[in-house]
Amino acid sequence: MCYYLVGLIQKSLDLKLILHVKGYYLQCLIIFIISDFKEYIRHAIFHKVGPLWKLHEFHHSATDLNMITNYRGHFLETALAKFFDVIPYIILGAPIHSYILITSFVEIHHLFVHSSVKSDWGFIGKYFLVSPAAHRIHHSTKNQHYNKNLGATLIIWDKLFNTFNPSEIVSEVGIPNNPYNKRGYINDIFICIKRFAKCSIHDIGEFLKKYKS
Ligand SMILES: [Zn+2]
Ligand SMILES: [Zn+2]
């Protein structure tokens, strides 16, 4: 459904801005950088907006990191994230092969950063890519690590927007006193929907109260 809508919007807008750039690999690089910035913004929004955090919290409730954790996301978050994902592609009009190339690289990188390897990747992790150690800090149980290292693949956004937390060894990951991981995956899916709905109703109520007064 989402891809169909994107196709329709792309056809009607027909921007194809990326075609003004000469060279296929340069085009891919620009699409990648803009998509990664979009992902930083999307991730920050899912951390700051109450109901969206209730969805993203599901990913953070993992008490250990391994490659499978990369796919531990609530389906509602995945669905909403798709609307953000397609924005650069609508504006830039990127061809499908560049999308496959970039997505493959990003997906492999995300598997590594969620792995149990705690490496900070040295020079690369300091100046270019989000390392497993940096993302482990993002998943840390400690208060001082909340909302840090929000970047998906490039580390530059965290440095620019002051959300970078330099690598240190984080042993405990997860969210203290969360309701997940007790009665199975299906139960957790429903708990997450309930928390999302409850928070949405509360926030809408608060907004209406402010609007009326
Ligand atoms: Zn997060
Ligand atoms: Zn993660």
Image: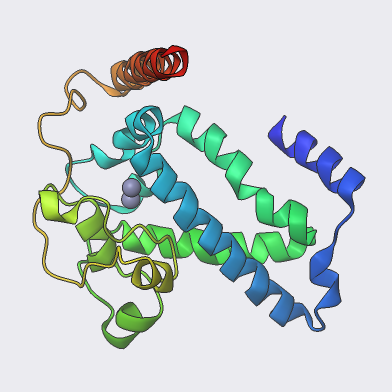
The image shows residue 210, relative to residue 67, as above or below, that is: above
- Residue 111 in the figure: left or right of residue 61: right
Residue 206 x/y as whole percent: 36, 17
Q: Is residue 113 above or below residue 28?
A: above
As drawn, 135 above or below 195: below
Q: What residue sits 41% from the left and 59% below the top?
A: 110
x, y (%) of residue 183? 20, 18
Residue at 20 percent across and 59 percent down: it is: 137
The percent coordinates of residue 192 (x first, y second) are 33, 22
Q: Quick check: can you spot residue 72?
A: no
* Count of number-bearing discs: 0
Quadrant occupied by the N terminus: top right
Asked whether the viewer can see residue 177, the reply is: yes
- Give whichever of 54, 97 is nearer the camera: 54
As drawn, 200 above or below 154? above
- Of residues 45 and 28, the one nearer the viewer is 45
